[in-house]
């Protein structure tokens, strides 16, 4: 039985290693005895090697993106092997803030296949935009992302996949998704995963929720939507992240 997983997505924050170590250190100090939850901090690349020394136990390290090649002439890219060397156990792939800058379902698929083949756990983000939602295309958008993103992924590696349902319009605090809607999407995603991997293999994939999560709504998202964890953006840089984890 997997533990509930709470993932911090620091995005392009904080602006110094000193602050990064400080926030990570507080998380470690406050939450390392909460063994029933798994905490993953997805930090900017430049901080990973320094945080590797502090991570451990139930507080693990993740990255926010990865390249699909093993290495070579690809200026600025970071490979799965580099992430592993830097202490990462997890990597976010397909976040909507990456999709906004041109990440496609096809490149996401290449990244997932490569990262997972190197033993990284993949946090694959899916979710509809505001426009897709308003046009009644939520299901179509999410099923398309899942189908292309997971195409050709080995059934034997499904235990290393987490799907983060993040409605794009709910990202950034203040616009949370209704619990019923998140629950509906949880069930919908499960059905799609059964189509892709079959019943037994799809059951190994954890589905989590992200978008405007804070310490006021975290417990309800877990209890009312049956999600297996949370992906937390803004609140993950503050004391609220510790409160979120303690409430689960
Ligand atoms: P948020 O971001 O918690 O600030 O809404 C979530 C995310 O983008 O992963």
Image (cartoon, rainbow, N blue to C red):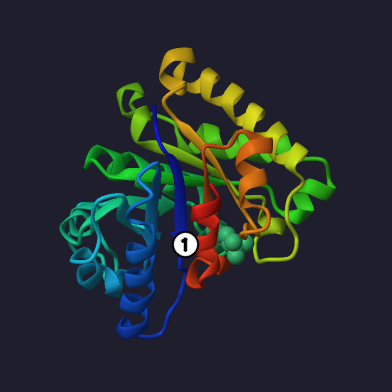
Q: Quadrant of residue 131?
A: bottom right
Image height of 220 relative to 198, above or below:
below
Q: Residue at x 38, y 54 (%)?
A: 40
Q: Is residue 99 visible?
A: no
Image x and y of residue 10, in percent? 45, 68
Q: Which residue occupies the extreme top position in the image? A: 199
Q: What residue did someone put label 1 on?
A: 9
Residue 74 shown left or right of residue 187 in the figure: left
Q: Residue at x 27, y 63 (%)?
A: 78
Quarter that holds the N terminus:
top left
Residue density around tag 1, few if under 14, some if 14–19, many if 20 or more, within 10 Å:
many
Image height of 91 relative to 143, above or below:
below
Count of numbered circles on the image: 1
Residue 178 shown left or right of residue 187 in the figure: right
Image x and y of residue 164, in percent? 53, 44
Write down which quadrant ligand 1 falls in. bottom right
């Amino acid at each position: 039985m997997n533990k509930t997983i709470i993932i911090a997505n620091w995005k392009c924050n904080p602006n110094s290693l000193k602050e990064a170590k400080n926030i990570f250190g507080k998380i470690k100090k406050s939450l390392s005895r909460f063994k029933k939850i798994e905490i993953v901090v997805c930090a900017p690349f430049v901080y990973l090697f320094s945080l590797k020394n502090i991570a451990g136990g139930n507080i693990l390290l993740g990255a926010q993106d990865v390249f699909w090649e093993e290495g070579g002439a690809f200026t600025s890219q970071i490979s799965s092997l580099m992430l592993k060397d830097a202490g990462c156990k997890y990597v976010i792939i397909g976040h909507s803030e990456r999709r906004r800058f041109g990440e496609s379902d096809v490149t996401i698929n290449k990244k997932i296949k490569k990262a997972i083949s190197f033993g990284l756990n993949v946090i694959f983000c899916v979710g509809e935009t505001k426009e897709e939602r308003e046009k009644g295309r939520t299901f179509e958008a999410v099923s398309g992302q899942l189908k292309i993103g997971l195409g050709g992924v080995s059934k034997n590696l499904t235990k290393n996949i987490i799907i983060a349902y993040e409605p794009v319009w709910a990202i950034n605090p203040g616009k949370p998704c209704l619990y019923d809607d998140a629950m509906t999407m949880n069930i919908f995603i499960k059905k799609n995963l059964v189509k892709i991997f079959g019943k037994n293999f799809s059951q190994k994939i954890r589905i989590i929720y992200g978008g405007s999560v804070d310490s006021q709504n975290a417990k309800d998202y877990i209890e009312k939507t049956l999600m297996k964890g949370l992906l937390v953006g803004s609140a993950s840089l503050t004391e609220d992240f510790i409160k979120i984890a303690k409430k689960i």
